[in-house]
């Protein structure tokens, strides 16, 4: 008999092309054999190569979707994708942790899409710090880490952020360690090297990575294993020819 699958939640934007956001997250959850719930933060108009527009939902509307699902008490892990800014994310996070104390939040702090669209402007480090205190893991890319900490060096920025929560600095935009992800957790640094697969850039890679890590954690993996396995899964997606499906079988 099949054992009951863990339940996880994604709070993210709708990308009708399915490469990023909620649809990519749900596909990733399925591949990892967890049950995925999805709450929408925004309706975007985009394709794999161009971003046309975004309509944001209000925080109250996002929470209205999440509340009845959280009330079941079954959701241990929740990832958060695109949001209109740090203040709105803080409001969301405070309410999520009030509704379900102990829920572990994985935040993908998407500031700009890979196709160049700005989701929100720069916020001071102090605002990010306040938010990160309620987050279990944050997954900035190199540029996002620099913006968040207000620091010109991405590694130093990630180290500074890690005083407030666990940080996975992603490798897609790193100069010195291209394709390497580094986890900063409890004073330790753990670098995950790229695998052997020849990858090509696709939009939504950061969404897929954070969803895969969320699923691996819900499946009982330790943080370092969840990050390594999440990265391997993402690389398989990036190495696949199936950009429309957005995933590759495990
Ligand atoms: N050239 C590469 N080789 C191996 N992994 C890569 C490469 N480029 C991106 N990745 C992986 O894809 C994931 C998303 O990283 P990144 O592209 O930096 O995020 P984002 O989509 O948020 O900008 C990370 O796990 C990163 O290591
Ligand atoms: C709904 C949604 N969420 C996130 C991203 C960022 O993904 P990327 O940076 O790869 O464009 C996106 N383009 N759309």
Image (tube, rainbow, N blue to C red):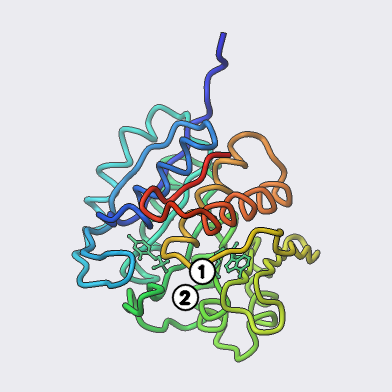
Point 31% across, 69% down: residue: 84
* Residue 156 located left or right of residue 63: right
Give how far across and how far down residue 131 sits, in percent: 49, 65
Identify the residue at the far right of this view. Answer: 188
Circle 2 sits on which residue?
127
Residue 180 in which image quadrant: bottom right
- Residue placed at 37% from the left, 31% from the top? 71
Residue at the disc numbered 1: 130
- What element does badge 1 sit on? helix
Against 204, residue 25 (above or below) is: above
Distance between the alpha carbons at the discs numbered 1 and 2:
5 Å
Quarter of the rendering occupied by the C terminus: top right
**Residue at the spot 39% in from the left edge and 63% down from the top edge:** 89
Q: Which of 46 and 59 is in front in this view?
A: 46
Q: Where is residue 185 in the image (x, y as percent from the top left)?
A: 73, 61
Place of residue 223 in the rendered image (x, y in percent of width and height, measured from the top left): 69, 49
Q: Is residue 228 rendered to the left or right of residue 131?
A: right
Which picture quadrant has residue 54? bottom left
The N terminus, quarter of image: top right
Above or below, 120 relative to 61: below
Label disc, if present, on residue 218 of the rendered structure: none
């Amino acid at each position: 008999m099949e054992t009951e699958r863990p339940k996880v939640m994604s709070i993210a934007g709708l990308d009708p092309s399915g490469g990023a956001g909620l649809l990519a997250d749900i596909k990733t959850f399925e591949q990892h054999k967890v049950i995925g719930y999805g709450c929408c933060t925004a309706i975007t108009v985009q394709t794999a190569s161009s971003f046309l527009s975004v309509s944001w939902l209000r925080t109250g509307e996002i929470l209205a979707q999440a509340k009845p699902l959280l009330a079941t008490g079954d959701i241990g892990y929740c990832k958060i994708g695109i949001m209109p800014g740090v203040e709105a994310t803080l409001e969301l996070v405070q309410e999520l942790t009030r509704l379900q104390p102990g829920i572990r939040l994985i935040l993908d702090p998407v500031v700009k899409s890979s196709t160049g669209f700005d989701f929100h402007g720069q916020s001071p480090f102090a605002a990010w710090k306040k938010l990160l205190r309620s987050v279990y893991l944050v997954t900035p890319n190199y540029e996002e880490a620099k913006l968040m900490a207000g620091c010109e060096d991405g590694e130093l920025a990630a180290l500074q952020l890690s005083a407030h929560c666990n940080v996975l600095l992603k490798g897609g935009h790193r100069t010195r360690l291209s394709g390497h992800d580094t986890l900063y957790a409890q004073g330790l640094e753990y670098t995950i090297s790229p695998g052997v697969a020849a990858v090509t850039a696709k939009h939504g890679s950061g969404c897929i990575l954070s969803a895969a890590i969320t699923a691996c954690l819900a499946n009982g993996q330790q943080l370092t294993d969840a990050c390594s396995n999440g990265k391997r899964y993402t690389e398989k997606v990036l190495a696949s020819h199936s950009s429309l499906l957005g995933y590759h079988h495990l």
